[in-house]
Image (cartoon, rainbow, N blue to C red):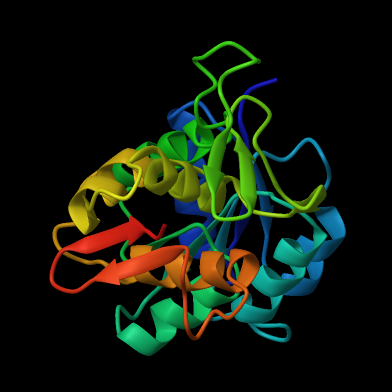
Amino acid sequence: MGTRVLLVEDDERIRQALGLALADEGYDVVETATGEEALEVVDPDLDVVLLDLMLPGIDGIEVCSTLRSRGDLPIIIATARSDTADVIAGLEAGADDYVTKPLIAGELAARIKALLRRRRPAGAEEAPGSPELRLGDLVISPGRESVERAGQPLHLTHTEFRLLVELATARGDVVTREQLLQRVWGYDYFGDTRLLDVHVRRLRRKIEPDPDDPTLVLTVRGSGYRTGP
């Protein structure tokens, strides 16, 4: 079975056209028109969700939040608006990536491929016993894609984990926003750093004792991020 994409789009013409285009790119597409239908058909065989934010009934933000609460299924949100509030709301709800309409099938396919590559554990090219990383009281195991504090696991999405590993591997050196976007998301966002900044906020909420006063992931203004002592 090929890569299975759940396409959630209420506009029938857009849904059919995009479904055919993605099928031509080699994807097995499951189509739904509402958020309610999407939540009903989600199963473990799905690989990624392409989710329109503007849906009748349950909107895309709520669907995204519900899917994220259920697990790590990769989510790309699609919006007709590129304004900051709309994009950030979707990312804060748990989306891994976003695209703006009109959607171009080739670009979307590239985004999906980059997102699915991140499902491999960061450092998966290394042996399963690859060295642990330590950040404050965190123990990060790249080979097992796990993070623990005092023996208790912390749940991170695949994207959040890769972001943490990139920062921890730098051992206090500054990693620029552009470097993180390229290494974690796999392609150039042409200066749009909302995606990164929202994921950093989400990561801090999970690993920092006080997310409002971070000590593990620090902002370097005008440049990027680095880890604390």
Q: Tell me which residue sits at (23%, 58%) in the image.
A: 177
- 104 over 83 or under it: above or below: above
Looking at the picture, how far across and down is residue 63, in whole percent? 70, 72
Instruction: Classify residue 39 as left or right of residue 181.
Output: right
The one of 80 and 189 positioned closer to us in this rendering: 189
The one of 90 and 201 positioned closer to us in this rendering: 201
- 109 over 213 or under it: above or below: above
The one of 174 and 51 positioned closer to us in this rendering: 174
- 178 over 27 or under it: above or below: below
Q: Tell me which residue sits at (47%, 75%) in the image.
A: 214
Instruction: Classify residue 221 as left or right of residue 226.
Output: left
Q: Can you say which quadrant of the picture contains the C terminus?
A: bottom left
- 210 over 64 or under it: above or below: below
Looking at the picture, how far across and down is residue 149, in whole percent? 72, 54
Q: Can you say which quadrant of the picture contains the N terminus?
A: top right
- Where is residue 195, by image quadrant? bottom left
Question: What is the tally of numbered marks visible in this picture?
Answer: 0
Looking at the picture, how far across and down is residue 137, in whole percent? 63, 54
- Where is residue 95, by image quadrant? bottom right
Q: Tell me which residue sits at (19%, 52%) in the image.
A: 178
Q: Tell me which residue sits at (23%, 62%) in the image.
A: 224
Looking at the picture, how far across and down is residue 219, in whole percent? 30, 70
Residue 48 in sight from this viewpoint = no
